Amino acid sequence: MFWRVSIGIAAAQLAYRRRQTIVSTLGVALGVGFFVATSALMSGSEKDMVQRLLDNAPHITVKDEFRTAAPQPVFMAFPQGAVSLSNTKPREYLRGIKNHSAKIEELSRQPGVIAEAALTGTAIVRYASKDVSAGIAGIDPEKERFLTTIESNMQQGSLMRLKTASQGIVIGQGMSERLGLGMDDLATVVSPAGIVRRMKVVGLFHTGNLLFDEGQAYMLLKDAQVLLDKPFIANRIRIKIADPDMAEDIAAQLESRWGYRTESWQEVNRDILGLFVIRNIITYSIVGAIMAVAAFGIFNIISTVVMEKRRDIAILMSMGFRAADIQWIFLVQGIFVGVIGMVLGWAIGLVLLEMLSTVEITVPGMMDTQNLPLERGLFQFGVGGLFALISAIAAAWIPARKASQVRPVDIIRGAA
């Protein structure tokens, strides 16, 4: 019985100040709606970017270099030398990863691991008196399709044609358009070592990344070794693992064991991942400010009711209502506003998501137009609703507590 009376009193007081109640409720609803939309957009774009990073590149890359420069022999021979030497000629060493075949075989025996030896470099692709500087990647086509999404981005031909064609090359759609170079045409490829090869175009890919499509070419590892004058050499070991989140730990283990610089996808993209954190902090701070403004509206309306209804509160307490009962009546008002604002906010969030899903954008550096990536999950709605309820109850707590501290004797005597 008490609960019905408390809820009835709370509803009546909110209905009496209808305009303020509506404004406060709309403030909460807008806060929840914007939280749902911005959270879905931020989370969706973050997951889309991370997925692109994981799909378009190996999880771990072992390079034929060292994280810190090796000490020169003279400093190793005389570490405590009294004479300082300068302008010493650095010790030269043969580039390439030693015993890369054995390392690939060892890695490939591990479950869920795909490893490939590659040779990268630069060359000039020439056709019809036009030159384009290109990054060359000597690969194993059978493994490359599991390491990157290049096979799924093929417009014509395929990576596997590199194994059947003599001196084949796969180029991007952008390079093809710049040079006027089509399928089965013969391009002249010139390496920095001065070696010139006539290579047949056996595939065209299109990733949407302008720089990549205009400046990357693939060929067999053995063809790249001949072109770059590095026989039997691989300067990269590219690795895909079952759990991408473990890439950083595995990379550290491989570097500690082999000595070569080993980079995980997290290390390579540290700046991008750091920007996600900063962006989320800024976004959620702005949405949190909207919710705080809505909470002040709830605080204002309940405080006003408490001030106006001091005599009514005194009468209720004289009829047997306890201080906790009075406090509960005003907390119920805050819960009412929070729940109604939460439900309306969810509806606003759904409308905003539908509107955002129709927006098309062109990202700088990308040739394709794409829709905004959105994550439609229960997490955004749950967190937004919980935030609304907490802010509404917190805003109602102080005036509700003040109402429970009213002394009915003083109020009734003052009224008399």
Image (cartoon, rainbow, N blue to C red):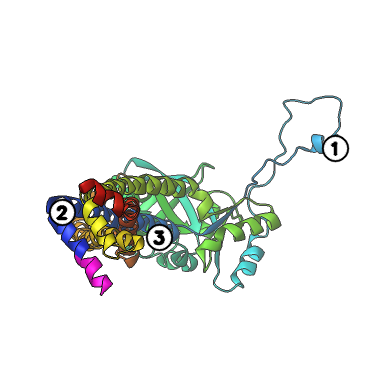
Q: CA distance from mark 2 to mark 1?
A: 82 Å
Which residue is denoted by mark 3 in the rendering?
A: 51
Q: Is the residue 89 above or below the residue 201 in the image?
A: above
Q: Is residue 245 left or right of residue 282?
A: right
Q: Residue 154 appears at what percent x and percent y?
A: 34, 62
Dot 3: few (<14), some (14–19), or many (≥20) neighbours within 10 Å? Answer: few
Q: Look at the image and give the residue range highlighted in magenta.
A: 1-8
Going from N to C along the chain, the mark reached first, 3 or 2, is 2
Q: Secondary structure at mark 2?
A: helix
Q: Residue 190 appears at what percent x and percent y?
A: 46, 45
Queried whether the magenta region covers residue 4, the answer comes back as: yes
**Number of on-image labels:** 3
Residue 356 quadrant: bottom left
Q: CA distance from mark 3 to mark 2?
A: 43 Å
The numbered dot on residue 77 is 1
Dot 1: few (<14), some (14–19), or many (≥20) neighbours within 10 Å? Answer: few
The numbered dot on residue 330 is none
Which residue is denoted by mark 2 in the rendering?
A: 22
